Image (cartoon, rainbow, N blue to C red):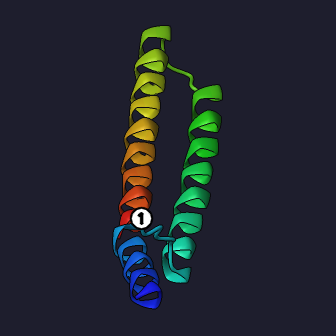
Amino acid sequence: MKLFKLILVIAMCLFLSNVHATETLPEKNESFKNEIKRDANKELNRVDEATCTGTDTECMKNKIGNRTEEGKELIQDKSNEIKNKVD
């Protein structure tokens, strides 16, 4: 009887336990590739902004556009990483 109760308790614990998923190796490589790509784009944008020869308004418009695009890419990549961790 004790053995049956022990097996029942272990089975219930295993059934109700949380499963912690991790990223697979291809998913980790994908996130690393995306991070390098974002950093490279960010540096290119900074160089482009530093060498802007237009008016202040045009340069500021370009800078705002770059920051918006960088933020969009960051959110998209991080949401994919979270999705991969959950899957």
Q: Nearer the viewer, residue 20 or 58?
A: 20
How many numbered circles are shown? 1
Task: Residue 10: give x, y in percent of width and height.
Answer: 45, 79
Quadrant for the N terminus, please: bottom left
Q: Nearer the viewer, residue 60 or 2?
A: 2
In the image, farthest residue toward the top:
56
Q: Is residue 62 left or right of residue 47?
A: left
Q: Is residue 73 left or right of residue 43?
A: left
- Element carrying mark 1: loop
| CA neighbours of label 1 inside 10 A, class few (<14), some (14 to 19), many (20+) | few
Which residue is at a point 46% across and 85% down the rendered structure image? 2
Which residue is at a point 46% across and 82% down the rendered structure image? 6
Q: Is residue 45 left or right of residue 76?
A: right
Quadrant for the C terminus, please: bottom left
Q: Is residue 23 above or below residue 60?
A: below
Which residue is at a point 57% across and 75% down the rendered structure image? 29
Q: Amino acid at mark 1?
A: Asn
Task: Residue 31: give x, y in percent of width and height.
Answer: 52, 65
Q: Is residue 35 above or below residue 6?
A: above
Q: Which residue is mark 1?
A: 18
Task: Residue 83: give x, y in percent of width and height.
Answer: 35, 61
Quarter of the image where one finds residue 61? top left
Quarter of the image where one finds residue 18? bottom left
Which residue is at a point 62% across and 34% down the rendered structure image? 46
